[in-house]
Image: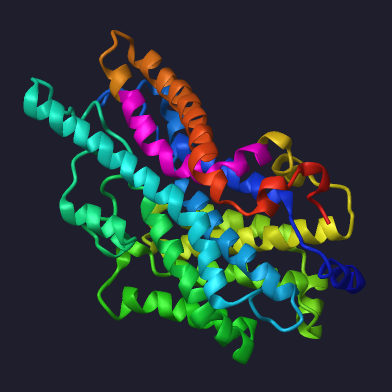
Amino acid sequence: MTIMIEKSTEKRLHLPYLDGLRGLASLYVVLVHVEPGIGDQLPESWSLFVRAMKYGAFSVISFVVLSGYVLMLPVARSTNGQLSGTLINYIKRRSRRILPPYYMVLFICLLIAGIVFIFERFTNFQWNEVAGLGSFSPKFSLIDFLLHLLIIHNLDGSSYLTINPPMWTVATEWQMYFIFPLLLLPIWRRFGLFAVVMIAFLIGLTPVYLLNGLFASANPWLLGIFCLGMAAADIGFSQKPQLIAIRNSLPWGWLSVIFTSIAFLTEWRRLGLHIWINQTFAGLAFACLFISLTKSIIEDKKPSLILRILQHPLAIALGTFSYSLYLIHGPVLVLVRYFLFYLPISPDMFAAASYLLGTVMSLIIAYLFYLFFERPFMSSFLKKSKVKNAVI
């Protein structure tokens, strides 16, 4: 196993199941954000399905852990524990990957809001908040827009869910991209893996317990969960004897199942636990899953069911434009709902059409958005990666 890990550091690594997970998680977020009821008229036949759509936070956790894992991979596989290239180049790469689609979606939201304002001003049209219920609102202030423009809206409790609510997580991860090389990596190099995880959780939980919930809208404990992704990469590829022993001795697949079960149990609101506890167990589950699946791939084992699902071409295809899907689906779902709201259809038909038409339109528009506003800014490696040559 050690020899295989050493050989894997000699070439660029791409694990297709990460793309598949990213794609399926984004699709689940779309389903979570569909609003299938007309007021309080949600048919009982849909109640079970709607309850299954309440775990969108787990998808967010998967994105955060995945970010820590992917950013740490080249560092963990390097011989000197450094980022490839300079800090400036790192920031440029992150900026090209994240900012152009983000700002284009913000512009689209501003354009829709402008059109609504003009119609309200010069016609009898008035935006119906019930019809337009969902993850987008054309009603926002100049402060809301400026905070989104600066990508710090997640720090303001009154602005972070305005305009396009899913975008608060983009702001939180964007800030982590700077904390990673400037704080987390120096701590990791100086004090080791377990120290950086504990310090990250300490930093993230300090506002919760000592600063009266300061910046609670940013979910600061996600910094510790981000470090769980870093830990998964380090454990998976480290050449340190202690981490090699941990990598080869623990049942990572079963640990993922156990932590997933605990995450669902601690999500139960009647227990009265703070949300960071539930999300941390979910983060541990994803971190263990990454170690288990990557280890399986490197050892050339027969793919498990979950690995086959995550490496399915459709899941990977979703992953290629998952960022665009995550960014643009809110406005699409709301406009689809607004259209359906005024059709003479039953509540059952409204719910079915909301899910079906909303999801299909989100996928189509997200893919077109990806082609025009995301793909041109991606690295050549990401553009050319194919399933057939993605695995080391």
Work out whether residue 253 or residue 295 is closer to the camera in this orientation and state it: 295
Side (left or right) of 38 relative to 313: left
Q: Which residues are magenta?
A: 315-337
Work out whether residue 119 or residue 32 is closer to the camera in this orientation and state it: 119
**Quadrant in the picture for residue 130:** top left
In the image, what residue occupies the spot 36% across and 55% down? Answer: 168
Q: Is residue 372 above or below residue 3?
A: above
* x then y, percent, for residue 238: 76, 77
**Quadrant in the picture for residue 124:** top left
**Quadrant in the picture for residue 70:** bottom right
Q: Is residue 250 above or below residue 352?
A: below
* x then y, percent, for residue 126: 12, 26
Q: Main SS of the magenta segment? A: helix
Q: Is residue 387 above or below residue 211?
A: above
For the N terminus, the image quarter is bottom right
Side (left or right) of 211 relative to 390: left
Q: How many marks?
A: 0
In the image, what residue occupies the spot 30% across and 19% down? Answer: 339
Q: Is residue 295 above or below residue 386?
A: below
* x then y, percent, for residue 178: 47, 73
* x then y, percent, for residue 350: 36, 17
Side (left or right) of 6 relative to 358: right
The answer to whether any part of residue 37 appears in the image is: no
The answer to whether residue 325 is magenta is: yes
Query: What residue occupies the far bottom of the structure in this picture?
Result: 190
For the C terminus, the image quarter is bottom right
The answer to whether residue 229 is magenta is: no
The answer to whether any part of residue 51 appears in the image is: yes
